[in-house]
Image (cartoon, rainbow, N blue to C red):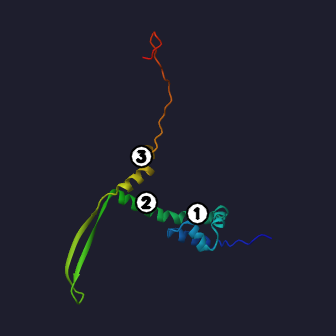
Amino acid sequence: MGRRSKYDPDTFPALAEKYAKMGLVDTQIAKKLGISHQTMNQYKNKYPDFLASLKRGKTVPDDEVENALLKSAKGYEFGYLEEELDAKGKVVKQKRGVTHVKPNTTAQIFWLKNRRPDKWRDKQDVDMTGEIKIVMDEDDKKV
């Protein structure tokens, strides 16, 4: 007699989506669900709702990281407020300012290599097809 599946259609898809939104990877999600990574892969193949929930959940942190990468690549600024307090905790002085964060060259390179690989990847494909004509003179010497 075969082993009974631990899969619960009422809880596994929702939990998988929740854990994926938290940024956990498949091996971590499987552990939280109390199953092996291999079993999780079987569930992804067998239960479309489970796979769809994982994909939905992973979209959230992936989008957040993509946005952070773009922000870092472009550079940004943010305002701050510093307060000086007296012994009683009362504000005696405030200082406001803006901090400028320079564009991150590494983030720019990463972004371009992945978003525009035709122009920015390290390996370029060069088409070397065509004819080679060798012109010889009367004495069979290359010209």
Spatial separation of the CA atoms under disc 2 and disc 3:
18 Å
* Residue that appears at 26% across and 66% down: 99
Q: From the image, tell me which residue sits under label 2.
A: 66
Spatial separation of the CA atoms under disc 3 and disc 1:
33 Å
User: Closer to the camera, 68 or 136?
Assistant: 136
Screen quadrant of the C terminus: top left
Q: Earlier in the sequence, mark 2 or mark 3?
A: 2
Mark 1–mark 2 CB contact (< 8 Å)? no
Screen quadrant of the N terminus: bottom right
Name the amino acid, label 2.
Glu
* Residue that appears at 45% across and 51% down: 114
* Residue that appears at 66% across and 67% down: 39
Q: Nearer the viewer, mark 3 or mark 1?
A: 3
Secondary element at image label 2: helix
The percent coordinates of residue 36 (x first, y second) are 64, 69
Name the amino acid, label 3.
Trp
- Residue 35, picture quadrant: bottom right
Q: Which mark is residue 52?
A: 1
Q: Residues within 10 Å of mark 2 (few under 14, many from 20)?
A: few
Q: From the image, tell me which residue sits under label 3.
A: 120
Mark 2–mark 3 CB contact (< 8 Å)? no
Name the amino acid, label 1.
Ala
Q: Residues within 10 Å of mark 3 (few under 14, many from 20)?
A: some
Secondary element at image label 3: helix
In the displayed structure image, the side of residue 3 where residue 86 appears, left or right: left
Secondary element at image label 1: helix
Count of residue discs: 3
Q: Hey, which residue is sitting farthest top in the picture? A: 138
Q: Earlier in the sequence, mark 3 or mark 1?
A: 1
Spatial separation of the CA atoms under disc 1 and disc 2:
21 Å
